[in-house]
Amino acid sequence: MRIALKTIYTIWLREVKTFAREKFRVIAMIAQPLLYLLVLGNGINSGVTLNASGGINYLTFMYPGIIGMSILFTSIFSAVSIIWDREFGFLKEVLVAPVPRWAVSIGKTFGGASIAIVQATIMILMAPIIGISLSPAMIVEMWVLAFLIGVALTSLGIAIAARMASMQGFQMIMNFLVMPLYFLSGAMFPLSSAPAWMKALMVVDPLTYCVDGLRNIILSNTTVTTGALVGRTIVDVASRVGLIRWSLPFDLLVVTMVATALTAIGAYRFSNQKE
Amino acid sequence: MNVIHVENLVKKFGQLTAVDNIHLDVDSGQIFGFLGPNGAGKSTTIKILATLLRPTSGTASVAGYEVTTKPNEVRRSIGLVFQDQSLDDRLTAQENLWFHAMLYDLPSALFAERADSVLKLVDLTDRRNSLVRTFSGGMKRRLEIARGLIHHPKVLFLDEPTLGLDPQTRNAIWTHVNALRAEKGTTVFMTTHYMEEAEHCDKIAIIDHGKIQAVDSPVMLKRMVGGDKIIVSGDERLLEDLKRTYNVDAQKVGREVHFQMDHGAEFVPKLVSDFAGRIKSIQVKEPSLEDVFLRLTGHTIRTDEGKAVDQLRQAAQLWRRR
């Protein structure tokens, strides 16, 4: 057990250290969401009005979605570094070491989740730019959710990358996993107005619960100031019109369960890889 | 004591039999060479011994532990230097060592001391805090050897340790390997397809198409081929007279006469006195491992193939540096 904990710590530290040294990755983590929010968000915001009252504009609606998206990208990127390590040999060093492989996988998962928290923090710092104010409690809740979804998505990436031999696989992951997960998460449009077949897919996308949870947190501290629903919280309004689908405890519960299951699957698949 | 023991080992990949029923015994403290062309099954055997691959059938034990049933014990007893580099080049030399020491559960007090000594051994002390990314190929290989040693393995596996390295670095690595064996009594199991390199080993196993053709010391192997080659040049009638005097199968090659003779060096004084004044020059050539390989397998070791692989590997390294 001591060896396993030591392994988790060692692998985690390597993930975090090498991440901090890759300046391009850090820059991408800041620039990409900024691009989405400022260009895409503002663009759509100026031409589209959501089917909702209570003064929720599109940017406010999209902000949690962009947080989810950026965590998705960072987590998957952390996980696919396994393919990178395999291609360039470092993985062998880890695989021949006298340590349990599941511990290596969990160390990597925590590494990915830690980077997800960094990503969430970057996003939190961007909130004032689009006019959203966050209380300390909300920030803590967002970190918790970011950590959990970071665990879930990094593990998902590990489960896939553990059996992938080359970098060609990376494009496959991007096209057939990351983009669908993102589009179906409700990051860009509300779940309630999607067609039935899409709704069915969105319900099984773990990122949906992350985005829904973040929306619960972010819309919780303002009350409606105009119209028929004056005095109600925006969460209340958003729930009524379908911008939010579930309650925050339910979202957290689903994300926790998904994170636990995927961690186990990722560790199992990593342990049983060939060579 | 046999530190490596292999019996009836077979590894198949689909239709291909990479390792075909081999037997091996390596004594403790030996430098054991595995000599053969690319694709002969050398790396596959190392991977099985290092618990990275499961054998199709047969048994193998390292440091007294069965590779299939006690992989963790085997892993703790061995150090590995791979054919391809396996360092994290975004970390410094020191950090790579630290990472390894953590995984091999080396107490941190011991780590500081051993890191100093292995870095000194491979002459990288002054670069310990540089990122591995900035290292040359030879420095990386030396660092890998240092890393493979830091947990004091009983057996050090070196898979083509000097592939693609310049002669100077190659010599330096051999100096280290010899020093290591002398200081720590480490057993070294290495693969190579360089003949000159195999000469350094105490024992060599010649492997071709997954089968071991012979196992012996370089000297004994060369003795299998027959005597030394004597090359003399002198007057016109030398060929006939040599044939008659020594009853040898001499041949004229250009202006020289070639024939084989056991203990060639000791034969020279006799030759000189028998043919006083008639000989212009004498050369004695010991048979090389190349000759041994040719005799055993019927073909030369396919070195050009190796060069193509080297080039690919170098291209991959360049690509990696981006």
Image (tube, grey):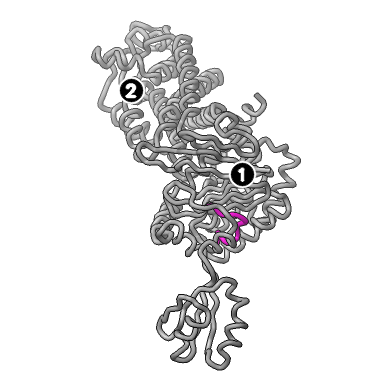
Q: Total number of numbered labels?
A: 2
**Picture quarter with the N terminus of chain B:** top right
At x 44% / y 61%, what residue is drawn? B294
> Residue A37 at what x, y percent from top left?
37, 31
Q: From this viewpoint, is residue B322 visible?
A: no
Q: Nearer the viewer, residue A6 or A112?
A: A6
Mark 1 lies on a secondary structure that is strand
At x 44% / y 49%, what residue is drawn? B40
User: Which residue lies under the disc numbered 1?
Assistant: B79
> Residue B201 at what x, y percent from top left?
60, 57
Kind of residue at disc 2: Tyr
Q: Which of the 4 quarters of the picture holds residue A238?
A: top left
Q: Nearer the viewer, residue B41 or B124?
A: B41
Label 1 with label 2: CB-CB less than 8 Å: no
Q: Which mark is residue A58?
A: 2
At x 52% / y 18%, what residue is drawn? A141
> Residue B3 at what x, y percent from top left?
64, 42
Local crowd at mark 2 within 10 Å, few (<14), some, or many (≥20)? Answer: many
Labels 1 and 2 within one chain: no
Position of A42 with respect to B233 (left or right) is left
> Residue B2 at what x, y percent from top left?
65, 43
Q: From this viewpoint, is residue B247 visible?
A: yes
Q: Nearer the viewer, residue A159 or A207?
A: A159
Position of A232 with respect to A5 (left or right) is left
Q: CA distance from mark 1 to mark 2?
A: 58 Å
Kind of residue at disc 1: Gly
In the displayed structure, would residue B124 be above or below residue A125?
A: below
Q: Which residues are magenta?
A: B197-205
Mark 2 lies on a secondary structure that is helix
Residue B201 magenta-highlighted: yes
In the displayed structure, would residue B322 be above or below residue A264?
A: below
